[in-house]
Amino acid sequence: MLGRSVGLTDAEMAAMADWETTPLFDATDRLVLRYAEVLTQENRVDDALYAELEARFPRKELLELCMTVALAAFVNRVHATFRTDVDDDTQTQVGDVSFCPIGH
């Protein structure tokens, strides 16, 4: 649902597990996805990755990207802790999927 609301196609959402190799994402998409994965898994961004981000995004956009990734992680942790039920509208649209298959 969130992916669709920002313009991702079903094919792009299905390819998230293969974000590094799928032709559906360009270099900027891959940079954002790598950043989100690193920040979520390691909770630390090294100097090299920061330099790539800083070269691609103005400071304001980089701050917005950081806040978006942080908010998504926060929401995911709340839902994981309380095993939040999916509302009927979302269930109708996405079916019986218990998780999003993003690689580790």
Image (tube, rainbow, N blue to C red):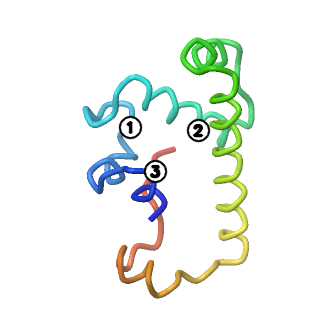
Res 23 → quadrant: top left
Q: Of all residues shown, which one is farthest toward the bottom?
A: 88
Residue that appears at 64% across and 44% down: 69
Which residue position holds label 3? 102
| Amino acid type shown at disc 2 | Ala
Are circles 1 and 3 on residues that touch, CB within 8 Å? no
Measure the C-alpha gap from mark 3 to mark 2. Answer: 11 Å
Q: Which mark is residue 36?
A: 2
The nearer-to-camera label among 3 and 2 is 2
**Residue assigned mark 1:** 19
Helix, strand or loop at mark 1: loop
Q: Earlier in the sequence, mark 1 or mark 2?
A: 1
Earlier in the chain: of badge 1 and badge 3, it is: 1
Q: Which quadrant holds the N terminus?
A: bottom left
State whether residue 101 is above or below residue 62: below
Q: Local crowd at mark 2 within 10 Å, few (<14), some, or many (≥20)?
A: many
Residue at 64 percent of width and 12 percent of height:
51
Q: Secondary structure at mark 3?
A: loop
Say which quarter of the image contains residue 44: top right
Q: Which residue type carries mark 1?
A: Trp
The residue sitting at 70% across, 13% down in the picture is 47
Give me the residue at 58% from left, 11% from top: 55
**CA neighbours of label 3 inside 10 A, class few (<14), some (14 to 19), many (20+):** few
User: In 3D space, how far apart are the residues under numbered discs 1 and 3 (Cα atoms)?
Assistant: 9 Å
